[in-house]
Amino acid sequence: MNRDEERAIEWDCQKTMRQYYDYVDHRDFDSAANLFTEDIDWMSHGVALHGRKELRDGLQAALGEGTIRHILSNTVVNVIDEDNAELNEYHTLYYSADEEYENLDGPIAFEGPHRIIDCFAALRRTPEGWRIAKRRAPIIFRRNPDEPVRLETWGKNEGKI
Amino acid sequence: MLLDHEIPRQYKIANRSVSQNFTPNEVVSIVDVEIVLTVAMLDRLTEVPRLGTRSLKNSHRSTGENIMDREQERGIEWECQKIMRRYYYHVDRREFEKAADLFTVDVDWLSHGVKLDGRAQLVEALYASLGEGTIRHVLTNSVVTVTDNDHAICRSYNTLYYSADAEYHEADNPLALEGPHRLLDSYAELTRMPEGWRISKRRSLLVFRRDPDEPVRLESWGKSEGKVSGQT
């Protein structure tokens, strides 16, 4: 593999991640889940999910209400081979648990980011394009750490912690 | 890109894919389309879309076929992201004419409920809204969807840091910061023009905002000029 081919993979993997958060932040959970491999190994906020079906359920439960925006930055893609890559980036999350932006006449009042996350993703080339095969997302900074977000509450109720 | 040794290449011509190993001066005859090209000529042809010129694009049109490959799409994605970033570079530094030149002459622009039509209105609004104070648009999450050789859509997030009154270039110290002032979903349509990719339509939706009841200059100006559309 030459550097041009590596750059193309880096570009495409970044696009898959950005596309995923564009879908998920706008509640298009089916399109979002389709950017993962069928056997996705997903863990975030202490909640472990396996496969697209569980992921789809988790997304609906966590983000079907409220408003979230994942701001992606500092993305570094390491190409392992022609079909595998790893990606690290930071996520700055803006979040309201109760207000839906699409049902309001104006913006939601905010005071700043709700949390900052170190994101790791392993991506795999599939016939459909690059897909996320594994995801980890430890929380580094968090506003109101004692107030669980919906994903944590759902994960606890479903025994997925 | 010039070849200096044997490199495997894949070229698509008139919807045909030809994958071979070529040397730079080798003559390649493609009988089906009745053309004879050297590898160097083929290379220049494949580079045209990445440079944003119109010549190859027109030949695509003449066949009525879309033969864009992923490499060409990546080239368009890169160019469109660059236009968006360059726009905010200029606008945040009050280079409003340069900023407006990155739009089509008939741009259809809507932000903060203010509707503008054409570059002249846009320049006027930029002076009115950002001629004072300090702003930084932190543009992230850009996803470019290539519609065809001449059209693309770019969706991004815009995190705005803003002071209505303080001028950073007149201050001895950095401006006080409490955090972002607002966060917007940004949508732009881009069109390939002879001078390069330009923004032909822009929409932005305010999602989060500090002090929602305090209008920013653009909103006050839009209201006084009768340019408020009712959409946010």
Image: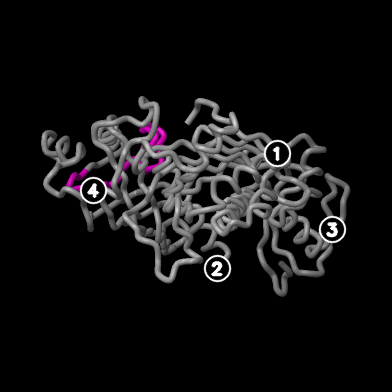
Q: Chain of mark 4?
A: A
Residue A36 covered by magenta stretch? yes
Give the CA distance from mark 2 to mark 1: 28 Å
Give the CA distance from mark 2 to mark 3: 27 Å
The residue identified by callout 3 is B37
Q: Chain of mark 3?
A: B
Residue at image location 37% in from the left, 41% down from the top: B209
Q: Are marks 4 and 3 on the same chain?
A: no
Residue at image location 54% in from the left, 29% down from the top: B228
Q: Position of residue B150 (x, y in %)?
A: 70, 42
Q: Amino acid at mark 2?
A: Arg
Label drawn at residue A3: 2
Res B3 seen here = yes
Q: Is residue B232 above or below residue B83?
A: above
Instruction: Please name which of the two marks, 1 or 4, marks the residue nearer to the observer.
Output: 4
Give the CA distance from mark 1 to mark 4: 40 Å
Q: Secondary structure at mark 3?
A: strand
Q: Amino acid at mark 3?
A: Leu
Q: Is residue B176 above or below residue A127?
A: below
Q: Nearer the viewer, residue A29 or A82?
A: A29
Q: Position of residue B106 (x, y in %)?
A: 71, 37
Q: Amino acid at mark 1?
A: Asn
- Bounds of the magenta segment: A23-48
Q: Is residue A135 above or below residue B223?
A: below
Crowding at mark 2 (Cα within 10 Å: few <14, some 14-19, many 20+): few
Instruction: Please name which of the two marks, 3 or 1, marks the residue nearer to the observer.
Output: 1
Q: Chain of mark 1?
A: B
Res A130 seen here = no
Crowding at mark 3 (Cα within 10 Å: few <14, some 14-19, many 20+): some
